[in-house]
Image: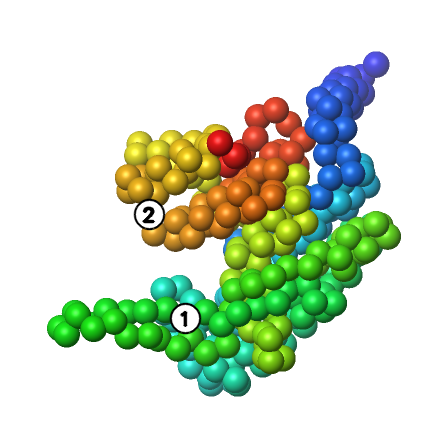
Amino acid sequence: MSEVDVARREEWLSKAGILTEALPFMRRYNGKRVVVKYGGHAMGDAALAQAFAEDMVLMKQVGMHPLVVHGGGPQIGRMLERLAIKSEFIDGLRVTDKATVEIVEMVLAGSINKGIVASINAAGGRAVGISGKDAGLITARKVSRTKTDPDSNIEKVLDLGFVGEPDAVDPAILETLSAGGIIPVVAPIGLGPDGETYNINADTSAGAIAAASRAARFVLLTDVEGVLDRDGKLIEELTVSEAKGLIKDGTVSGGMIPKIETCIQAVEQGSGAAVILDGRVQRAVLLELFTPHGVGTLIRGA
């Protein structure tokens, strides 16, 4: 046997070993729903996007029920720039007037959603794209923010326009699609009580869907390694109470706070556990679910 043949055989044996290691985890998640919030760098990089699509197909193939909820802030921003529509942000939320929400829906439920669906289908899966407006999936309520004037100390209510948050989630359509062998891909748009269209933060939408569907795992892909301690080291696992403590004592700050709060809410309201993962790592979802090591921060109930 030549050196090349020996090397190939070692490679095959290594891959077989990986599959054997993954088998107990495949059994654990067989028939279980996993909600994945997809966005950030993972969605903007072509190689990572293809790998993500393949990962979703593999998860479905081994008996899991993956469900994708995606964002699209950068793409929305670029389209608004092209149309010369200016954006204003308050506490990280885009102020969304009637003209803007139409563009938001067009981009999220249109080009982005169908692009993800096409990638999953090209990878051998069967995906269908919907928005929170379909089949009453997400009923939204208007979001408002308050701001205190530093001079008068008077609290003022700020109108964010058509920015919403989930008021109720009916996962029936997702269960129907999953049972039919389909991977649902959800755009975070909701319908208000009077028929208004609301732009909803993708993290918030995904967390609410994970809770309502009692997902075994809620996976939140980000552009950071996970939750870090005061020394900058990754914290691999937290209870809900420990996660709340990190926010309270200031260990966690900035944009990580709403992500952790979303994970906490998902776990407290029905999801088995939540994971904050670095979407810049190829195959991050598979590494987290199918190996004993994990690559992010797991948040579980107390």
Quarter holding residue 136: bottom right
Identify which residue is drawn at 83% across, 14% down. 1
Q: Amino acid at mark 1?
A: Ser
Residue wearing tag 1? 144
Closer to the camera in the image, 118 or 154: 154
Q: Is residue 285 visible?
A: no
Identify which residue is drawn at 40% across, 48% down. 256
Residue 229 is marked as none
Q: Amino acid at mark 2?
A: Ser
Q: Is residue 269 visible?
A: yes
| Residue 262, horizontal then vertical, whole percent | 49, 50
Identify which residue is drawn at 71% across, 22% down. 21
**How many residues crowd mark 2 within 10 Å: few (<14), some (14–19), many (20+)?**
few
**How does the figure colour the protein chain or chains?**
rainbow
**Is residue 8 positioned above or below 184 on the image?**
above
Direction top: furthest residue = 1
183 on left or right of 240: right
Direction right: furthest residue = 180
**How many residues crowd mark 1 within 10 Å: few (<14), some (14–19), many (20+)?**
some
Identify which residue is drawn at 77% across, 53% down. 175
Residue wearing tag 2? 253
**Is residue 104 positioned above or below 272 on the image?**
below
| Residue 252, horizontal then vertical, whole percent | 34, 43
| Residue 42, horizontal then vertical, whole percent | 57, 51
